[in-house]
Amino acid sequence: NAGVMQNPRHLVRRRGQEARLRCSPMKGHSHVYWYRQLPEEGLKFMVYLQKENIIDESGMPKERFSAEFPKEGPSILRIQQVVRGDSAAYFCASSPPLAGGFPQYFGPGTRLTVT
Amino acid sequence: AQSVTQLDSQVPVFEEAPVELRCNYSSSVSVYLFWYVQYPNQGLQLLLKYLSGSTLVKGINGFEAEFNKSQTSFHLRKPSVHISDTAEYFCAVSVQTGANNLFFGTGTRLTVIP
């Protein structure tokens, strides 16, 4: 059973460009979570999605950031007009539909560098 | 609101010595508790979890943790560390009802010295 897949693993963008980060959950998992890890810090929750629904986006910046989890295909975290402060590691986690959504299993992360 | 405090940002320890990584949390409601390990440039791997039942939880790689509700703590322990245990360790909590998101501590870097 493959784990949570994320791609790309590393992404370099110039200021003002768009970044698209993809996450494929573990087989059988229908809950997806996105977290951001700034250098030397712990992970901060961004958004929680189920298929075709955003359940909790309380951790998402109000502008430039969006997330989706379509019926078919991976979940996508999209950052428009990136700025230097967006440089971070972005982790996706997934959990099964039952058992209250725990535990969450994490992917290897996408390291975004904005130049 | 929930919060997690990992008091020690760095813990050096000699190989084969015991180690304890401290975690305290704050929450007005019942919580689930987790420890994750992150090796350099990798994602987080679940070490162990407390959802309910016995307060002493055993995880992978010889780690264990004890949930102490009165002290709101969930300290991680290992009786004898190996070089391969060198990594960043994160404590995380989530409420038992409502939101599913995890709240993470700032991490403790464990360095095992040969």
Image (tube, coloured by chain):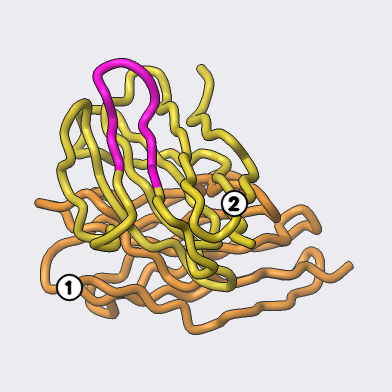
Q: Which tag is nearer the camera, tag 2 or tag 1?
A: 2
User: Is residue A106 magenta-colored?
Assistant: no
Where does residue A53 sit, x and y in percent of width and height? 16, 33
Quadrant assignment for the C terminus of chain A: bottom right
Residue indicated by mark 1:
B1
Q: Which chain does the numbered disc 2 sit on? A: A
Give me the disc on residue A109.
none
B21 or A64, which is in the foreground? A64
Q: Is residue B66 left or right of residue B63?
A: left
A78 or B110, which is in the foreground? A78
Structural crowding at the residue carrying mark 2, measured as other residues with C-alpha within 10 Å and reported as few (<14), some (14–19) or many (≥20): some
- Compared with A112, A30 (above or below) is above
Structural crowding at the residue carrying mark 1, measured as other residues with C-alpha within 10 Å and reported as few (<14), some (14–19) or many (≥20): few
Question: What kind of element bears circle 1?
Answer: loop
Label 2 and label 1: CA atoms lie apart by 35 Å
- Compared with A1, B16 (above or below) is below
Q: Is residue B24 left or right of residue B20?
A: left
- Compared with A6, A51 (above or below) is above
Instruction: Specify the segment rendered in magenta.
Output: A67-78
At 56% from the left and 45% from the top, the residue drawn is A110
Q: Colour of chain B?
A: orange
Residue indicated by mark 2:
A13
Q: Which residue lies most toward the front here?
A: A16
